[in-house]
Amino acid sequence: MKFHRMKKEFIDLIPPGLDICLLGLQGSRMLGLAQTNDADYDYRGVFVAPLKDLLALQKPKQTIEINMGAGDGQAEFVFHEVEKFIQLCMKGNPSVLHLLFIPKYNVKTAIGDRLVQNRNLFLSEPAIRKAFGGYALAQILYLKRNHKFPARQKKEKHIRHCFRLFDEGQELLQTGNITVPLPNPDKYLQLQTITDDEKLVEIFEQRDKEFQACKSILPEKVNPYLVNKLLLKIRGLDN
C-alpha cells in the first residue's frame, strides 16, 4: 500500500496487513489552526475487515488507536472499521465526518472514494444539529465548570473547538459541505483571546440560537436501505 505525503516513522506505526481504504490528516494541521510548526499529527482512517473475520466467533476490533506519545510533532492514528465508520457518520460525529471532506488523502482506494462520493447518504438534519451543537455545548460547559484553568492553552483549545463546530455544522446543514481547511482560522484565534468567561458564554448563547434557527437542506432521516446497499457493495456482497 502506498502512503502519500507521510513520514516513514509514522507509516511504520501502522499494523501491517490492515486494509486501509481511507486515511487523512485531521486536527489543527488539517483545519489551519496549528499554533506551532511542531504541532501533533492527528490521522483518522477507515479500514475494511476481512469477511471471514466478521463471520468468526471472535469479532475483529472495530476501532484501532495508535499513539506515539504526547510529544510535539508526533503522530496519533484512529482507524474505524468501515461499518462502524458509517454508523458514526450517520450519528453526525464531527471528527469522523471530517474525513469525508478533506481535500487531500494519504490513502484513498476505490472503496474510500466510494465512501467520499456517497457521503450525502450519511447526513440528516437532526443528527447534525444534535452532534455539532452538542459537541459545541460540551466545550462551553467545560469552560464554565473549569473557569480557573491551570493552562491557558487548554482553555483556548476548547474555545476554538466550540465556535468552529457551530460554523462547520451550520455550513453542513445549509450546503451539505464542510470547507477544509477553515476559510477564516483567524476568527477562532481571536475568539480564544477573550478572557471574560461571561462574555464567552454570552457569545456562545447567541451563536447557539443562530445555529438552531438556520434552515437546512438535509433530509430528516438517513435512508437505511441505500446505506446498507453501499455497505454490502463494499463487502463485495451486492453487485
Image (spheres, rainbow, N blue to C red):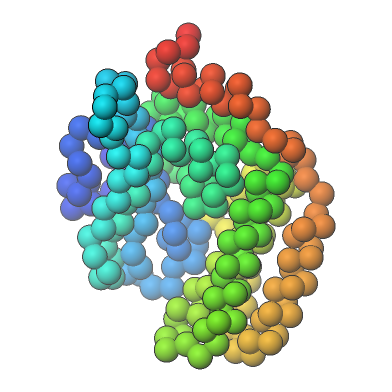
78 on left or right of 103: left
Q: Nearer the viewer, residue 179 or 147?
A: 147
The answer to whether one can see residue 186 in this image is no
- Quadrant of the frame with the N terminus: top left
> Seen in the image, is 213 located left or right of residue 71?
right
Single out the residue that lies furthest toward the top: 239
102 in relation to 202, above or below = above
Residue 31 visible (yes or no)? yes
Instruction: Give above or below for 46 relative to 129.
Output: above
Rendered image quadrant of residue 35: bottom left
Examine the image and state in which quarter residue 142 appears.
bottom right
- Provide residue 192's location: percent of width, then percent of height: 57, 79
Which one is nearer the viewer's eye here, 166 or 110? 166
Residue 145: give x, y in percent of width and height: 55, 82
Choose top left, top right, bottom left or bottom right for residue 19. Answer: top left
Q: Position of residue 22 (x, y in %)?
A: 39, 37
| Figure label count | 0
Identify whether 216 is placed above or below 1. below
Residue 48's spot in the image, x, y percent?
35, 30
The residue under the point 44% across, 32% down is 83
Picture residue at 30% right of the left edge, 39% below the top: 61
Seen at 27% across and 69% down, the residue is: 70
Q: Residue 174 or 54: which is nearer the viewer? A: 54
Residue at position x 66%, y 59% from top? Answer: 133
* Vertical arrangement, residue 43 with respect to residue 164, above or below: above
